[in-house]
Image (tube, helix red, strand yellow):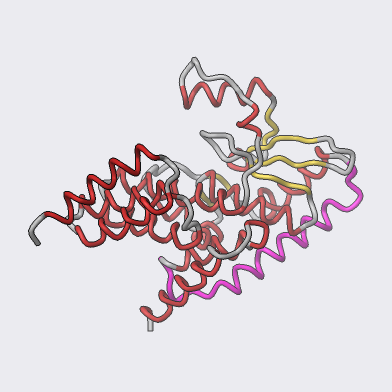
Amino acid sequence: MMAEAGALVRSRLAGLGRLDDCDIGLAEAALLLAALDHPRAAIDGYLAYIAELADEVRVAAAGADDSVHLATALFEVIGRRHRFRGDDRDDDDVANANLMDVIDHRRGVADALGLLTLEVARRAGLIAEGLAFPPHFLLRIADAQGQRIILDPFGGGRALGPPDLRAMLKAAAGMAAELEPVHYAPLGNRALLVRLQTDVKMRLLRCGRIDRALGVVESTLLFAPDIAPLWREAGLMHMRLDNPGGAVAALEQFVARTPNAQARARTLSLLAELKGRPH
């Protein structure tokens, strides 16, 4: 039964890989990924809870006409009423990045908590975007007049100005790093999900759990099959796990998809070596 449930979840994730980005349901996709670790859990109850949060935000934001008050209403519901909080005390705890666990325990890492907050905001009718800020998930809220505010869901909805963003960037990337327009760019739904999965993968790799990290990469490829570097990453992980068949299959996908001629040539050489090894 559990195997059948897992297969169904993977089939649904693969279906997302065939959709345009705007047609991907962010919360549903994140809950499907969470269900890979909780195959007996039904996502409908979690979706209903997210809808309830959005209804509360919609009521709290009624009459708000600027981005500051809209943000206040959002985090009044998320933070104060429902007590969601950022929790990164155990840097290797991947449960804090699983949306089901985040909802159950009301705490999560920056990407998971940010994704939940973004989904609630959108369902409540707010104009909200997740930003491509590299070290930390940030949320941008806009009002009808076009005024925008950048917020830190992990930090309880704290508003951030350029000095705050610059300090965060330098702390993560070094003192030479400077803010660039790309750091303010909105991320699409698929990119947000890939970002969440990347966080989980990196935590597992820090623990030396290559087998589980490979599972995360392969589940990411279900809904993002056109991200060529992920296929190469999967192939190299298969090699480290002494699975040449899996490595060949993944690396062939990389060769078929990458636009980088040099990377393709290097990988073809690696494939020739793998195929020439005695089994």
Up-down relation of residue 53 to residue 146 (above or below): below
Residue at coordinates 59% horizontally, 68% vertically from top-left?
Answer: 46
Q: Relative to residue 17, is residue 62 drawn left or right?
A: right
Estimate the x, y position of residue 223 in percent, counting from the top left: 50, 61
Magenta span dominant secondary structure: helix
Question: Which quarter of the image is occupied by the C terminus?
Answer: bottom left
Estimate the x, y position of residue 54 in percent, counting from the top left: 74, 60
Q: Relative to residue 223, is residue 145 drawn left or right?
A: right
For the record, the magenta segment spans 37-65
Up-down relation of residue 36 to residue 200 (above or below): below
Estimate the x, y position of residue 31 in percent, counting from the top left: 54, 64
Quarter assignment of residue 24: bottom right
Q: Is residue 96 magenta?
A: no
Identify which residue, 212 or 252, lies in the foreground: 252
Q: Is residue 64 magenta?
A: yes
Quarter assignment of residue 166: top right
